[in-house]
Image (cartoon, grey):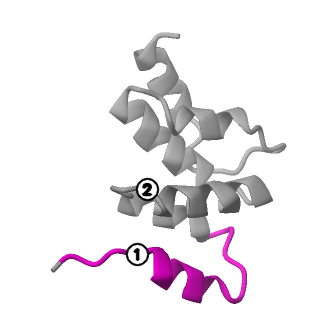
Amino acid sequence: TNPVVIQNLLQLLRRRALPCFDPRLIDLCRHPDELVQCRAITALAMNQHPLIRAFAFERLQDDKPSQSYMALFHRNYEPGDEQRILELLRLPD
């Protein structure tokens, strides 16, 4: 429950995919602590799973999507996603 401990544990997951994907990692992307969110997204981006792809599209539909969520498509992109991504992106004036 301690954000600093969670941040440090997530730091260990930032370079390699988990042997078995755990959806709780997605929950950490919604954590109230911004650094926990950032590190969870970085760790999540190392993995490939349909839930990650669905989460990435969900986040792109937010009012203020973070560009860090685009990293989730690196291992979870499927042909044809480019059109959907372009439709969801909001470019600044």
Residue 57 horizontal/vertical position (percent): 58, 64
Q: Is residue 91 above or below residue 76?
A: below
Q: Of 45 and 56, which appears nearest the observer?
A: 56
Residue type marked 1:
Leu
Q: Tell me if 24 is positioned left or right of 74 in this view.
A: right
Residue under pointer 2: 62
Residue under pointer 1: 89
Q: Residue furthest top?
A: 1
Residue 58 horizontal/vertical position (percent): 57, 57
Q: What span is colored magenta in the figure? A: 74-92
Q: Is residue 58 above or below residue 12?
A: below
Which residue is at 20% across, 76% downward? Answer: 92
Which residue is at 48% across, 67% downward? Answer: 70
Q: Tell me if 34 is positioned left or right of 8 in this view.
A: left
Q: What is the quadrant of residue 4 in the picture? A: top left
- Residue 56 shown in magenta: no
Which residue is at 71% across, 88% downward? Answer: 79
Which residue is at 65% across, 50% downward? Answer: 16
Q: Quadrant of the C terminus?
A: bottom left
> N-terminal of the two: label 2 or label 1?
2
Q: Residue furthest right?
A: 20
Q: Residues within 10 Å of mark 1 (few under 14, many from 20)?
A: few
Q: Are marks 2 and 1 in contact (CB under 8 Å)?
A: no
| Residue 54 in sight in this render | yes
Spatial CA span between label 2 and label 1: 10 Å
- Residue 82 shown in magenta: yes
Q: Tell me if 46 is positioned left or right of 42 in this view.
A: right
Residue type marked 2:
Asp
Q: Of 75 and 61, which appears nearest the observer?
A: 61
Q: What is the quadrant of residue 74 in the picture? A: bottom right
Secondary structure of the residue carrying tag 2 is: loop
